[in-house]
Amino acid sequence: MSTVLNPPHASTAEYVDQVMQIVKAKNPGEPEFHQAVFEVLDCLRPAMKRHPEYQEAKMLERITEPERVVMFRVPWFDDKSQPQVNRGFRIEMSSAIGPYKGGLRFHPSVNLSILKFLAFEQVFKNSLTTLPMGGGKGGSDFDPKGKSDNEVMRFCQSFMSELQRHIGPDTDIPAGDIGVGGREIGYLFGQYKRLRNEFSGVLTGKSMDWGGSLIRPEATGYGSVYFAVEMLKTRGETLEGKECIISGSGNVSQYTVEKCLDFGAKPITLSDSDGFIYDPEGISREKLAWVMDLKNNRRGRIKEYADKFKKAMYTPIDRKLDYNPLWNVPAQCAFPSATQNEINPKDAKNMLKNGVKLVSEGANMPSALEATKMFIDAKILYGPAKAANAGGVATSGLEMSQNSMRLSWTREEVDDRLHKIIIAIHKNCFETAEKYGQPGNLVLGANIAGFLKVANAMLEQGLV
Ligand code: NDP
């Protein structure tokens, strides 16, 4: 394996390229992690040039190495009394500016690469929120889909039996993500409390009756739309009357639809891992309430939307296609809100051809690297995930504050704080992009602004 040139002898470009190669060599078989690291490091070039002290301190090698990775066995009994075994993870990526903070994902696709990419992204996202939170992520390859409540509970209890050793309200505070909603957070919290004999703010996304925050369920979707509104303002535009294509139909997607409606926009698509619906009449508040019941209570499939609302069309996923027809629906705004790499270069081309002028990423890393580049080159309004979806973790931070103070803020108060945080994040990304010579490039702005705070904290705390 190659090593980095001694910092004084390497140019900034050589240094960044070499760290990318080292990350690839040291983390084989982790394409998502490589992708997330490459995007960030590539954007950091102008900042590294302006701050040679980071290269001297080997800052890039340090931020790409997790502080700690925990991997563990999760055994549980299914309803037929058969033993089952899953793999659990917690990636504690950086505690430079606060305790580790980031969600848990339960999905069969979960592996080390995906969680390391999510934890890495989380470090910069949390830094942008203005709140003191480090970055982490965790989860399991457990699939809650099709499992009974009792099976989900037994899995969560086994998962937490190990995880509880590594987390705590001042150490590491997990939250939800794909496959981890209010039900799972409840079971996880119950087991933590039983084992540790403490009632503390160790998880966020809790239910309102026992320490949760108003607006936390809504926060990521609302935040992604607030971010879109801020981007539009820079061009003297609003969301009013604009058609919006949205992917997913889970937590983020549902509240993205709701906030789009608040701003007078017209949401027209939703999806799940089987296919998508297109409703040319628009997804109204009544239809959204039906979707929420379908997905959150009945745990049904989005296909049923087209059975219920006759003007809507359902298209099943065709894995033979090299593009996703959802992104081929003409619209002015897009809110990818399902999963990573759901927009490939062909999708990006279709979106640009069909009139998309704004992309606000609710999901984490939904656009492939090449698709990201196409959006930047086309100079559309492009809000990268670590900025556009930071409202979720920001409101988790507000939940932590309320837990520490042992009080609850009103809905209006939390929403107002969330809104102000998103406005501040947009301003920071926008101004940083200008300062580093690429006005309008919010990917560059978000990566540099998020990095600077973490890197400076690391310099001040010594080589730890
Ligand atoms: P949910 O589990 O509530 O919903 C996920 C949605 O995406 C479901 O409709 C699901 O369909 C779909 N989906 C998941 N995986 C795939 C896949 N491989 N292919 C196609 N569709 C898929 O999760 P969230 O809404 O919480 O999360 C969505 C995205 O937002 C994720 O990228 C997450 O990391 C990101 N995010 C979430 C935050 C939060 O606060 N919840 C905060 C910041 C980012 P199906 O039901 O068929 O699985």
Image: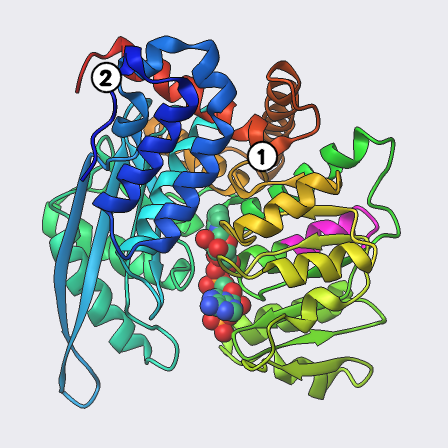
Relative to the observer, which residue lies in front, 271 or 293?
271
The structure's colour scheme is rainbow
**Dot 1 corresponds to which residue?**
443
Whether the magenta-drawn stretch holds residue 261 is answered as: yes
| Residue 156 spot, x, y in % from top left | 23, 64
Q: Which mark is nearer the camera, 2 or 1?
A: 2
Give the extent of the magenta segment: 256-265
Relative to the observer, which residue lies in front, 345 or 357?
345
Q: Residue at x 82, y 82 (%)?
A: 311
Q: Residue at x 75, y 38 (%)?
A: 379
Q: Is residue 246 above or below residue 333?
A: below
Q: Is residue 383 above or below residue 103?
A: above
Describe the element under mark 2 as helix, strand or loop.
Answer: loop
Q: Residue at x 11, y 51 (%)?
A: 195
Q: Residue at x 82, y 45 (%)?
A: 239
Mainly helix, strand or loop, the magenta region? helix
